[in-house]
């Protein structure tokens, strides 16, 4: 082995925890469906806080709740946990105004292709619809679950009912609690009975997406009882309310999800299995178009919907805050990055996957 190869091999060993110096033992990955970079980095768009453009009723309290004089104040009002805790203790990438661009690489810019890319590490041109078709590709969740140290310790809770197909639960054998599926495989407490009744009774006819509150509480109960090492949690209201043209409800849903992130983090930090050894990763599946009209939509023909952002906080992620003046990051890098946080080399098994983001994973001796 020549000297350069030796250096690269040594660096790779450190990067993937071969020396056992990574502290992360668990990862919680959360997605907020279709949240634009504009809301994430500049907060509520004041041009949409009205009836004509944003569907905001005149008597709504949303302008008062989230309107502020500066972008930084607005984003902190909308996402107090992400900007008050994650940005201070970890990193947030994807703000084009700060020369920190993020990109969806599949070119289609809607949900199934986005989540497949996010979870598999590469774009598949055959994934070109939101149809309920089993994903032929293996997600990093399934890949991890096949390893003895993760087997039976990986789970997913999602508001959208297509995820059992995206994660291919029939093949992967992963527990994927998506859409209107009741919470199973936990103790049947009064809380669980009530939750399952609400899951069954809350949706209107024809709905395939359950309220994010039910998804969150199902995941919280499962986490506390089963203690998975990898938990994937996906909220959907931010996307569905945007499509409905209700900017007020989009903002309210985003703010509610931020509160769920805080509660989730506080929950795991109070548990010895997670405290000090858990990394939280938050991201989205696609962007959206610009105000005043295209903010409702996304897709291949909608400019701006290729944008992507992500945030991370944990014991192996340096506290660099909001990243500026960095090279473009791709949605296809998420899978390998999460694997690297757990000391696993995903790209060695899946060479076409995007490379892990090195500055999000810092080995410690």
Image (cartoon, rainbow, N blue to C red):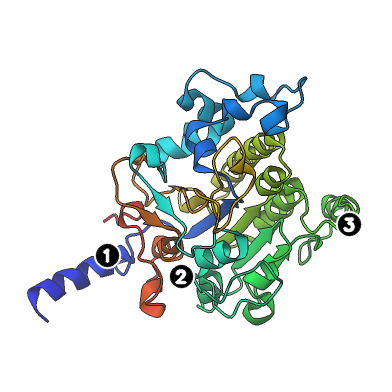
Kindly state the secondary structure of the residue where label 1 is placed.
helix
Judging by the rendered image, the residue that carries numbered circle 1 is: 14
Residue 167 seen in the current view: yes
Of pointers 2 and 1, the one earlier in the residue sequence: 1
Image spot of residue 100 (x, y percent): 35, 44
Kindly state the secondary structure of the residue where label 3 is placed.
helix
Q: Dividing the picture into quarters, in which one does residue 67 lie?
A: top right
Q: Is residue 134 left or right of residue 362?
A: right
Asked if disc 2 and disc 1 are in contact, CB closer than 8 Å, the reply is no
Crowd around label 3: few <14 · some 14–19 · many ≥20 (10 Å): some
Identify the residue at horizontal 53%, vertical 31% (top origin): 43
- Say if 255 sits above or below 7 in the image: above
Whole-number angstrom distance, CA of label 2 to CA of label 3? 35 Å
Of pointers 1 and 3, the one earlier in the residue sequence: 1
Image quarter (top left, top right, bottom left or bottom right) of the C terminus: bottom left
Of pointers 2 and 3, the one earlier in the residue sequence: 2
Judging by the rendered image, the residue that carries numbered circle 2 is: 122
Identify the residue at horizontal 47%, vertical 26% (top origin): 71
- Total marks shown come to 3
Whole-number angstrom distance, CA of label 1 to CA of label 3? 48 Å
Asked if disc 2 and disc 3 are in contact, CB closer than 8 Å, the reply is no
Crowd around label 2: few <14 · some 14–19 · many ≥20 (10 Å): many
For the residue pair 73 and 58, the one nearer the viewer reads as 58
- Say if 115 sits above or below 171 in the image: above
Judging by the rendered image, the residue that carries numbered circle 3 is: 200
Image spot of residue 163 (x, y percent): 67, 66
Whole-number angstrom distance, CA of label 2 to CA of label 1? 24 Å
Q: Is residue 14 left or right of residue 72?
A: left
Q: Is residue 323 left or right of residue 63?
A: left
């Amino acid at each position: 082995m020549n000297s350069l190869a030796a250096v690269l091999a040594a660096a790779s060993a450190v990067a993937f925890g071969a020396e056992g110096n990574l502290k992360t033992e668990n990862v919680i990955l959360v997605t907020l469906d279709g949240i634009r970079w504009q809301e994430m980095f500049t907060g509520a768009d004041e041009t949409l806080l009205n009836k004509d453009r944003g569907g905001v009723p005149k008597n709504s309290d949303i302008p008062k709740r989230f309107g502020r004089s500066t972008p930084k104040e607005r984003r902190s009002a909308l996402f107090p946990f992400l900007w008050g805790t994650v940005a201070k203790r970890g990193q947030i990438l994807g703000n084009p105004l700060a020369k920190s661009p993020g990109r969806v690489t599949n070119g289609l810019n809607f949900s199934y292709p986005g989540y497949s890319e996010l979870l598999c590490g590469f774009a598949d041109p055959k994934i070109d619809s939101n149809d309920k078709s089993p994903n032929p590709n293996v997600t990093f969740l399934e890949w991890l679950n096949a390893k003895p140290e993760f087997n039976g310790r990986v789970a997913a809770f999602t508001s959208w009912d297509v995820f059992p197909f995206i994660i291919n639960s029939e093949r992967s054998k992963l527990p994927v609690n998506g859409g209107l599926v009741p919470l199973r495989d936990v103790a049947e407490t009064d809380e669980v009975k009530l939750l399952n009744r609400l899951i069954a009774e809350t949706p209107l006819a024809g709905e395939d997406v359950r309220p994010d509150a039910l998804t969150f509480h199902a995941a919280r109960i499962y986490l506390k009882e089963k203690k998975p090492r990898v938990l994937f949690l996906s909220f959907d209201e931010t996307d569905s309310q945007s499509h409905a043209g209700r900017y007020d409800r989009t903002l309210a849903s985003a703010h509610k999800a931020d509160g769920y992130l805080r509660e989730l983090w506080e929950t795991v930090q109070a548990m010895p299995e997670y405290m000090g050894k858990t990394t939280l990763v938050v991201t989205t599946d696609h962007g959206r178009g610009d105000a005043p009209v295209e903010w409702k939509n996304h897709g291949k023909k909608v400019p701006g919907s290729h944008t992507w952002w992500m945030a991370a906080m944990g014991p192996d992620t340096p506290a660099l805050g909001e990243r500026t003046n960095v090279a473009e990051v791709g949605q296809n890098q998420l899978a390998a990055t999460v694997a690297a946080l757990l000391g696993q080399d995903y790209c060695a098994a899946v060479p076409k996957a995007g490379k892990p983001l090195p500055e999000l994973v810092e080995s410690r001796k």
